[in-house]
Image (tube, rainbow, N blue to C red):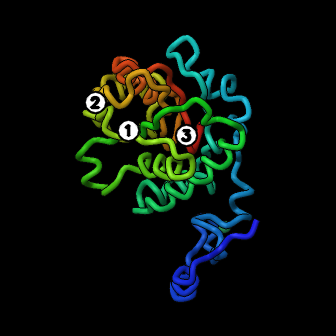
């Protein structure tokens, strides 16, 4: 497929070469955030091809009615996949999140993952956290997905009321308690009778998804599915 590149972008690319988020080599003019070689080497999960039954979907079995679950890649510490996450979470690179959203939309879209989805809800962060970081990385993932699929975002449907510190050092059962009642339903109109796709950056135990999902079900969501950038085994 031939990609048309606008004149301003060509000029901008000459003056301000963009670098790959992973290998820091110069990006080609048609590449966004990540070069083709690094993209090919991401440890993909292939969950999109069996969204109803995979190890991520199984996290929710017996706990919450999650229809489809998928993640683009396995999140591994000190690897290119964690490098991408650090950039979009802690280094102000919301644009990386949007580009990754485009990739998720393209690959999962080909597998029909978005069929039947009515609305996208990114996992919210607290107002305090948003003030500190300036943006919600999951919102920008959702924005990339929404741009590519045309599915609208309902980002004010649920609010995050409590932030209990970074979860990265906690064990599974501690994480579960750590997010308990961290979300509150704000605008049920946007999700009532809809099949909602929850978007998160990384899913580990699924406890954050379940806490947020609880509020969405309370608001009358018809069905819930989950898509994340990374999945931790
Ligand atoms: Zn690269």
Most foreground residue, 211 or 106 = 106
Q: Callout 3: 10 Å neighbours few (<14), some, many (20+)? A: many
First along the sequence among labels 3 and 2: 2
**Residue placed at 24% from the left, 45% from the top?**
127
What residue does disc 3 label?
A: 228
Q: Residues within 10 Å of mark 2 (few under 14, many from 20)?
A: some
Q: In the picture, which quadrant includes the N terminus? A: bottom right
Residue placed at 29% from the left, 26% from the top? 185
Regarding residue 117, the answer to whether it shows in the image is: yes
Question: Which quadrant of the frame does ligand 1 lie within?
Answer: bottom right
Disc nearer the start of the sequence (1/3):
1
**Front in this rendered view, residue 9 or 78:** 9
**Mark 1 crowd level (few <14, some 14–19, many ≥20, 10 Å Cα):** some
Secondary structure type for disc 3: strand
Q: What label sits on residue 154 in the rendered view?
A: 1
The mark closer to the camera, 3 or 2, is 2
Side (left or right) of 197 relative to 26: left
Q: Which residue is mark 2?
A: 187
Residue 106 in the image, given as x and y percentages of width and height: 65, 49
């Amino acid at each position: 497929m031939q990609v048309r590149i606008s004149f301003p972008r060509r000029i901008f690319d000459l003056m301000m070469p963009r670098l790959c988020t992973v290998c820091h080599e110069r990006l080609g003019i048609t590449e966004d955030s990540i070069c083709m070689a690094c993209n090919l080497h991401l440890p993909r999960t292939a969950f999109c091809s069996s969204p109803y039954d995979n190890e991520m979907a199984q996290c929710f079995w017996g706990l919450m009615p999650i229809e489809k679950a998928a993640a683009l890649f396995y999140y591994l510490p000190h690897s290119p996949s964690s490098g991408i996450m650090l950039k979009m979470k802690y280094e102000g690179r919301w644009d990386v999140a949007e580009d990754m959203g485009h990739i998720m939309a393209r690959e999962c879209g080909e597998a029909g993952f978005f069929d039947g989805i009515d609305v996208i809800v990114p996992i919210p962060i607290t107002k305090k956290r948003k003030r500190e970081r300036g943006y919600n990385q999951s919102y920008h993932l959702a924005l990339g997905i929404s741009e590519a699929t045309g599915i609208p975002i309902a980002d004010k449907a649920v609010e995050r009321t409590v932030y209990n510190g970074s979860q990265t050092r906690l064990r599974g059962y501690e994480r579960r308690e750590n997010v308990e009642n961290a979300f509150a339903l704000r605008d049920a109109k946007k999700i009532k009778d809809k099949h909602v796709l929850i978007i998160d950056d990384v899913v580990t135990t699924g406890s954050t998804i379940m806490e947020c999902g609880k509020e969405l079900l309370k608001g009358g969501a018809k069905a819930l599915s989950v898509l994340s950038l990374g999945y931790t085994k």
